[in-house]
Amino acid sequence: MDGSFIDIWYSLKLKDRYSYHWEHRAINAEKNVIASNISDIPEEALRDFLSFVQKIMERGIRIK
């Protein structure tokens, strides 16, 4: 394991409130947090987010 993890949060009280976070400093030592422009629909946003993480992991690219 590389020490990275994904945190997914959905509000049970507030509709369409959610957040996704990929902690991957162990992979590339980056400390920058970058906002994304993914869908406002939680299901689509999760798909986009996981696809992004998968592409980065497959390529071994450092995020800048």
Image: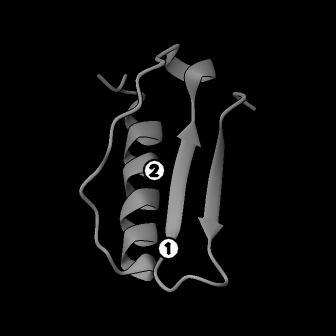
Instruction: Return the mark for residue 1.
Output: none
| Nearer the camera: disc 2 or disc 1 | 1
What residue did someone put label 1 on? 17
- Classify residue 47 by image quadrant: bottom left
The type of residue carrying mark 1 is: Arg
Image quarter in which the N terminus is found: top right
- From the top left corner, tell me how far across and down residue 7 is, in percent: 65, 52
What residue did someone put label 2 on? 54
- Classify residue 43 by image quadrant: bottom left
Q: Residue at x 72, y 29 (%)?
A: 3
Compared to 22, does 38 lie above or below? below
Compared to 13, does 64 lie above or below? above
- Classify residue 59 by image quadrant: top left
> What is the tally of numbered marks visible in this picture?
2
Alpha carbon distance from label 2 to label 1:
23 Å
Q: Residue furthest top?
A: 29
Q: Residues within 10 Å of mark 2 (few under 14, many from 20)?
A: few
Q: Residue furthest left?
A: 37
Q: Residue at x 48, y 18 (%)?
A: 31
Q: Residue at x 53, y 13 (%)?
A: 29
In contact (CB < 8 Å): disc 2 and disc 1: no
- From the top left corner, tell me how far across and down residue 23 is, in percent: 59, 35
Q: Residue furthest front?
A: 13
Going from N to C along the chain, the mark reached first, 2 or 1, is: 1
Q: Residue at x 29, y 22 (%)?
A: 64
Left or right: 35 as drawn, with respect to 2: left
The type of residue carrying mark 2 is: Gln
Q: Secondary structure at mark 1?
A: loop
Looking at the picture, tell me which residue is in the foreground, 36 or 27. 36
- From the top left corner, tell me how far across and down residue 20 is, in percent: 52, 56
